[in-house]
Amino acid sequence: MSTTSAPYAGGVSDRRSFDPDGLGFDPSRDAPASLPTALPSPLARGLAFVAIIVAGLAGALIGWGFTDLQCDDCSTTTMLGAVLGAALAAGGTAVVAVLVLRAMGEWTADDPRRVLDDDDWLDGPGLT
């Protein structure tokens, strides 16, 4: 009677039998080099970051101005109003920026001009 286990029985030896060289998955070796990506451009990500910073500064100014009008000698309350205004404005802008960047990524990923031909998929390392 054999002591070897059946495939997918959870044994380590079974798992290694499907990876003959023992290296596992290596993206630089196994994946095609020109896969389309949904990642937005660095310019778009930089503009989103700048928009969040500007919105935070504007929210701080609005929060400071709003609380400064309410009382005459309240430096702590004015500071808390500025911090709260900055956090709310930057947080809201960050949500909108993430949604816009995701939408941009989906638009470029679905672009028919970026679809690879069958021959292009076979040009990756280890796929010929």
Image: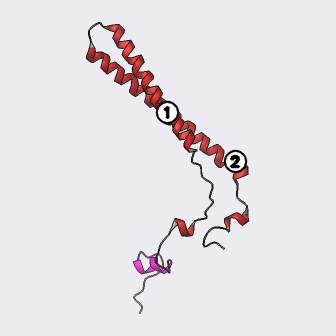
* Residue at x 39%, y 28% (from the top left corner): 87
Q: Tell me which segment is drawn in magenta.
A: 8-22
Q: Earlier in the sequence, mark 2 or mark 1?
A: 1
x then y, percent, for residue 70:
34, 8
Q: Is residue 118 above or below residue 36?
A: below
* Residue at x 47%, y 34% (from the top left corner): 94
Q: Quadrant of residue 86?
A: top left
Residue count near mark 2 (Cα–Cα under 10 Å), binned few <14, some 14–19, many ≥20: few
Local SS, label 1: helix
| Residue under pointer 1 | 50
- Name the quadrant of the C terminus: bottom right
How many marks the image carries: the answer is 2
Residue count near mark 1 (Cα–Cα under 10 Å), binned few <14, some 14–19, many ≥20: few
Query: Which residue of the protein is positioned furthest toward the top in this rendering?
Result: 72
Q: Nearer the viewer, residue 6 or 33?
A: 33
| Magenta-drawn stretch contains 12 | yes
Q: Nearer the viewer, residue 3 or 106?
A: 106
* Residue at x 39%, y 18% (from the top left corner): 63
Local SS, label 2: loop
* Residue at x 52%, y 32% (from the top left corner): 96
Q: Which mark is residue 111?
A: 2
Badge nearest the viewer, 2 or 1: 1
Disc 2 marks which amino acid?
Answer: Asp
